[in-house]
Amino acid sequence: GAAGERHTAQALQPLLAQGYEMFHDLGFKDANGKSFNIDHVLVGPAGVIAVETKARSKDAAGNGKEHATVKYDGKEIRFSNGRETQALEQVLANARFLSKELTTHTGEKVFVHPVVSLPGWWVDQVAPKVNPYVQNPVSLVSWISNLSKPPQDPAQRKRMIGFPTKAAAPRNAEAK
């Protein structure tokens, strides 16, 4: 898990040159007091993006591109050795939480793009333009770079960037 998160964080670094601020491994508490984290939050020209990284081993019995490819249809991620929906549910919940918190913090509606990062996998988008977006970290950079960039109020962006640093702290600051 931690290696996959590092891989995603490193792959996203070029977005800094495009004006993005990045926050990694942010810890929060939900309304019931349960702790959870958001692996990566980006704030930049295309708005706010919440990224959940899922590192998953490939099927030991297989090799070749077909065993390194997942299919994503907007409802589930299909690996050669099973199906996954939990990551989709998690990133959608994280994006809703962050949107609500940022909207409260800034006083303005903030949409958060939910994204699942799958390091080491080729993702076949069976249903393009679905929410959440699922891709490997390298392809995420291109996708984020090409998101539509509505005019953003500099004051709102400053308030959004200030929120994670005040409201959340890395779960394990020594490891990051």
Image: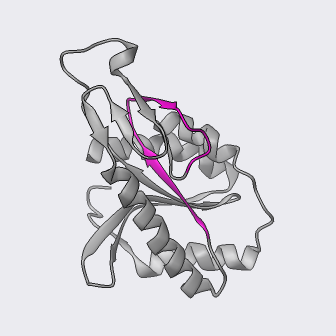
Q: Residue 38, relative to residue 116: is it above or below?
A: below
Q: Is residue 53 magenta?
A: no
Residue drawn at (62%, 44%) of the image: 129
Label count reads 0
**Horizontal arrangement in the rendering, residue 76 relative to residue 111 (left or right):** left
Tell me if residue 126 can be seen.
yes
Does 118 lie within the magenta span?
yes
User: Where does the image place residue 7, in percent across and percent down from the top left?
Assistant: 39, 40
With respect to residue 47, does 137 lie above or below? above
Q: Residue at x 61, y 68 (%)?
A: 111
Relative to 125, 91 lies left or right: left
Single out the residue that lies furthest toward the left: 61
Q: Nearer the viewer, residue 55 or 25?
A: 55
Question: Which quarter of the picture shows residue 44?
Answer: bottom right
Q: Is residue 128 left or right of residue 9?
A: right
Q: Quadrant of residue 143?
A: top right
* Residue 22: image location, x then y, percent: 52, 59
Return the residue found at the far right: 151
Above or below residue 28? Residue 73 is above
Is 60 in front, or is 163? Answer: 60
Q: Which residues are magenta?
A: 111-130
Q: Quadrant of the C terminus?
A: bottom left
Q: How is the image coloured?
A: one colour
Residue ranking furthest to the top: 64
Q: Position of residue 52 (x, y in %)?
A: 40, 53
Q: In the figure, residue 119 lies in which quadrant? A: top left
Residue at the image position 27 percent from the left and 47 percent from the top: 2
Residue 95 % position (x, y): 48, 65
